[in-house]
Image (cartoon, grey):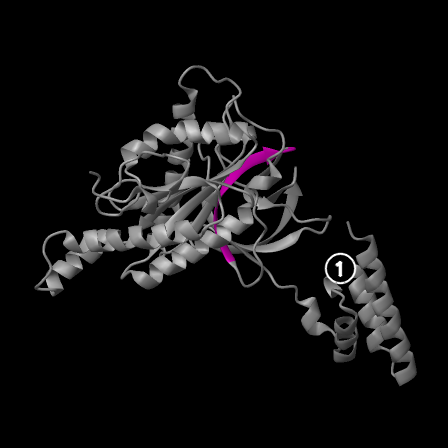
Amino acid sequence: MPLFDPSQMPLRTWCAGSREDAVTGLVAFPDFHSSIPRCLADALAGGRLVALAIGDVDGLKDHVERTNSTDPASYGHLAGNQVMATVGATTRAWFHEQPFDSGCAATFGGDEVILAAAVDDAAQFHRALMVLRDRLGAALPVTVSIALMFVTAADRPAERPQGWKHRFADSLLAEVDRTLFLHKAVGRAGRAQGGRIAVTRPLWTATSHPAVPDPLTLLPLPGACDVMHVVARPERVGGRGFLLLPCHGPVGQRGARLRVTFPDDASKTVVAYALRGQAAVPYVTVSDEVTGIAVSIQGVRDRAPRSLPQDLADALERAGLDWAAVPGHEQAQILHLVTEAHAPEVRAGRITAAVDAVAARKKTAP
């Protein structure tokens, strides 16, 4: 008789028949590792978007040592087992709430978990992963950091000899794991808190290099109130150096301003542009030896709305229009005309004309 209830294990069609890890209640890694290459290959062949994530407990060794030294009732590494049991229970509950129809959650190493699933929307899964991260942080005495990658059929190697599925799956898991440790190392060096979610793209090889990244795998750029941790890929385009981000490029020629923080904690405000649909920021130091750089990116709020006269801001709000739709040089011209109008009727007319100009821009926006 089995010592566990298979219906409670975190799996849907993938890794069926696997054994349960005794501590976490997740799929045991040997069974995951033997099954996931076929599951992954079949999903990609069917045109599905696959999410791969690895979560690692931050500072588990320090927690165990601290508990052993301060709690007389603590016994050896049981404190670590208690943490991992809670990680497993929280992950299982989260997994069963998710809408995807194919996937599983497994162990990976002593204090890591793997999530793999065929998903419909990358941004939606990214948000769901934030929920799991926050739940784990609330339930544990430590945080959990997570690395995430999205994969499509275009990321498969062009040549697929016998055994390619296992090599391909291992290369993806290795890249996600490398991303996790890159960001954990940056956090430790900068004394930043754990609990990061770091996003990466598959590392292209000579036999797998799509001309254009699949837009399904790219996330939106973060807003001014959000920070996103990513692995950026250095690349030369037209003789210029760039960092390619795992995000959609901004629409239009103006680009989007981002605050980029590098591994040495140096921050710089730059303009991100779209290269083949992917967000990219200028980067001087491009080295063939460096395949990925752990950076944090944050949107920069446009200063223009705060400088708007109140009557113009109110008129735009009533019309449901975004002042940012107007190019910067036109904004300056409109503001000059409005602010130099001293007669109330002239000012009102110019505000009406300004609103009409923004509305016209909205209609012609791509």
- Residue 223 falls inside the magenta stretch: no
Asked whether, in this view, residue 60 is left or right of residue 349, the answer is left
Q: Is residue 272 visible?
A: yes
The residue at the point 21 percent across, 44 percent down is 22
Instruction: Please state the extent of the stretch shown in magenta in the rendering.
Output: 227-238
Residue 270 versus residue 276 in the image, above or below? below
Task: Residue 235: say if magenta.
Answer: yes
Q: Which element type, helix, strand or loop, lies under badge 1?
A: helix
Q: What residue lies at 77% left-to-right and 58% top-to-bottom?
A: 327
Query: Which of the two residues, 124 or 214, is positioned nearer the viewer here?
Result: 124
- On the image, numbered disc 1 is attached to which residue? 325
Q: Residue furthest top?
A: 161
Q: Is residue 29 left or right of residue 293?
A: left
Considering every residue shown, the one lying at the far left of the view is 72
Residue at the image position 88 percent from the left and 69 percent from the top: 353
Residue 28 lies, with reference to residue 196, above or below; the image says: above
> Residue 188 location in percent, x, y?
33, 53
